[in-house]
Amino acid sequence: MADWNPELYNRFRRYRAEPVEHIFSRLQFADDEQMIDLGCGPGDNTVELARRSAHGAARGVDSSPAMIEAAEKLRDSLPIDLKSRLSFAVIDVSTFSADREYSLIFSNATIQWLRDHRGVFTRCLAALKPGGRLAVQMPANAIETAKVEMDRLLGESPWRELLGGIQIPFRKDAVPEHYLRMLTELGYADVDSYYVTFHHPMDSPAEVVQWYRSTGLRPFVDALPDDRQGEFLAAYTERLERAYGATGPMTFDFRRIFIWGRRPG
Ligand SMILES: C[S@@+](CC[C@H](N)C(=O)[O-])C[C@H]1O[C@@H](n2cnc3c(N)ncnc32)[C@H](O)[C@@H]1O
């Protein structure tokens, strides 16, 4: 699969920042936090974490070399104090493990790409210092028009034949009750999980296609021969125009799931 495209991903930065603001609004930062950002992407949130803890350190890890390159570039542009408290590395989160190193594990819009959530949250608990906190957000938007239409289109000819073999780890069981039970069973304290739906004004359904082009549609579009990619995106755009009943401004609703826990002690 082609690497992520940080530029395209950043295009909707303002909207993608809203769930992060939600997380920050619930977190209090001590002066000496040891933090890790799992699936840090271009690093903006990792920088924000470091900014919020006066003498704390934040490490961003991501499996995409292009994302880590963008994050390193961002780090290089920062004042020396902040820069010295940040580090980035190419790491697959499904192999991440540590022993009581972190006071905060943060992960925004990444864990949905992993299959074994129980394994990840088990290793996160071991990686937290006693009293350390876990704050996670993932998309949970299978019910929204754009996602429903995407699944329909992928199930139809010729896309079904061209793309049917592609497996992505998105889960339909990503409901708050599932994570409340899982984290409690694993031994987390102060467990919380809930949905929040964000409402994003868009110029047109074509913008929604651009949104998904940089995330959920990547595995599919990248798997198509170059001369079919435009055709697929045009078919998807046409679908969305019909489904939303608009070719101009519209609201794109995006439901997300938040997951919180704390290591006892
Ligand atoms: C939607 S982006 C979120 C980036 C960032 N957390 C943010 O909020 O802007 C998803 C990120 O997950 C990363 N990712 C996907 N699978 C991963 C894995 N197995 N290990 C580490 N990072 C992964 C991608 O490279 C991408 O940067």
Image (cartoon, rainbow, N blue to C red):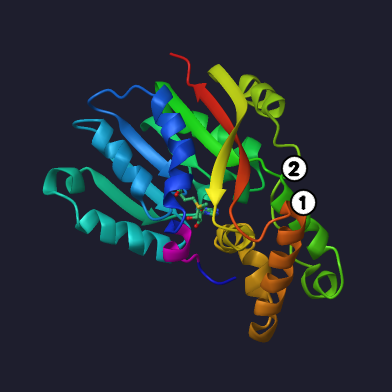
Rendered position, 128 above or below 77: above
Q: Which residues are magenta?
A: 4-9
For the residues labelled 1 and 2, the Cα–Cα distance comes to 6 Å
Where is residue 137, by image quadrant?
A: top right
Categorize mark 1 by other alpha carbons within 10 Å: few (<14), some (14-19), many (20+): some
Q: Position of residue 242 (x, y in %)?
A: 76, 59
Question: Label 2, on which residue?
Answer: 143
* Amino acid found under the numbered disc labelled 1: Val
* Amino acid found under the numbered disc labelled 2: Ile
Q: Residue drawn 31% across and 40% down? A: 48
In the image, 110 versus 129, the foreground residue is 110
Q: Is residue 110 at least partly visible in the picture?
A: no
Asked if disc 1 and disc 2 are in contact, CB closer than 8 Å, the reply is yes
Q: Earlier in the sequence, mark 1 or mark 2?
A: 2
Looking at the magenta stretch, what is its main secondary structure? helix
Q: Position of residue 57 (x, y in %)?
A: 26, 38
In the image, which disc is placed on residue 193?
none
Mark 2 residue element? loop
Quadrant holding the N terminus = bottom right
In the image, which disc is placed on residue 148?
1
Q: How many marks?
A: 2
Question: Does residue 207 appear to the left or right of 12 in the view shown?
Answer: right
Q: Is residue 154 at least partly visible in the picture?
A: yes
Q: Residue drawn 41% across and 50% down? A: 61
Does the magenta-highlighted stretch encompass residue 8? Answer: yes
Q: Position of residue 70 (x, y in %)?
A: 34, 62
Does the magenta-highlighted stretch encompass residue 108? Answer: no
